[in-house]
Amino acid sequence: MEGIAATFGNAGTSYATDGYGPGVDDTTAPAEKQMRLRYAGTCRICDAALPAKTEAVYERETKTIRCVTHDHDLPEPDLDVDIGEAGSSARREFERRKAGREKRIRDKHPKLGGLILALSDDPPSTTAWDTGAVVEERLGGRLNSLQSEACRVLHDRRIPESRANIDHLAVTTTGVYVIDAKRYSGRPRLRVEGGLLRPRVERLIVGRRDCTKLVDGVLKQVDVVRTVVGDQIPVHGVLCFVDADWPLIGGAFTTRDVQVLWPKRLQSTLTSPGDLDVHAIERVHRELASALPSA
């Protein structure tokens, strides 16, 4: 916008402007303006990278910018739609297993049960549920910060006639994203085998672990969602690794149509412009909430 020259640095850096800098009487200036960025910046709300020449909203009071898809404040949730609570089913399973172990030990050792519990840890089969809940809660908080008419989310959705659940769903202008949140140590990478004399096989490797089955799981979830929304709405599978050893530059990739990335990259993906309007987004969001209830 004319009269604004934004200077941008790393995330959290203030954005000084020609017209609204220190010492200038800007009491009559508007609280915010939509502008085309001269330099790259970062959204205040979702931490998404905003390239130079992107349309963004400059907030005079905080001297920061945000994506144009965000309202100034997060929108009120639609009371008719239960968006769910991220990580709730994993948290309940962890508490159930933890309480069951405590009861067994106290019943078997009435006098020493408390001491045994204090000196021993829960088994990995129990703590894995706690880890899963924490990861889903963290990613769910990021997704909630993106909520707007152009990005609606659902958490912890139960798959009918199955014990499985879908961690997160996001309905945006570019379609529906089926998001599986994971916390693995090591660097995610794609290993390709064959291709010339034998069939091409893609494997997802994290550190030294073959995690290809995670891709299979997401593809099954994508099929479930596609039966709900139909073939006219794009459905994207996503594996989001939290706290993995991602490289400083690049690192995201796609295997068998499933995107493998990290939380900030996911946020940038979800805010990309697309063809679905707000009415279609609301309709699809309601259909998914109805067909896939909270777990």
Image: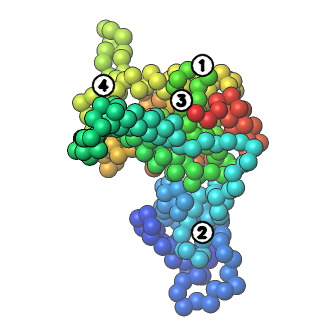
| Residue 11 in the figure: left or right of residue 88 | left
**Amino acid marked by disc 4:** Asp
Q: CA distance from mark 2 to mark 4?
A: 45 Å
Q: Could you tell me which residue is drawn at 41 percent across and 65 percent down?
A: 10
Q: CA distance from mark 3 to mark 1?
A: 11 Å
Task: State which quadrant residue 199 falls in.
Answer: top left
Q: Which mark is residue 210?
A: 4
Q: Is residue 182 visible?
A: no
Q: CA distance from mark 3 to mark 4?
A: 22 Å
**Amino acid marked by disc 2:** Tyr
Q: Residues within 10 Å of mark 4 (few under 14, many from 20)?
A: some
| Local secondary structure at mark 4 | strand
Q: Are marks 3 and 2 in contact (CB under 8 Å)?
A: no
Q: Residue furthest front?
A: 111
Q: Position of residue 34 (x, y in %)?
A: 65, 65
Q: Which mark is residue 161?
A: 1
**Quadrant location, the C terminus:** top right
**Quadrant location, the N terminus:** bottom right
Q: Which mark is residue 58?
A: 2
Q: Position of residue 87 (x, y in %)?
A: 50, 41
Q: Nearer the viewer, residue 184 or 90?
A: 90
Q: Is residue 259 above or below residue 119?
A: above
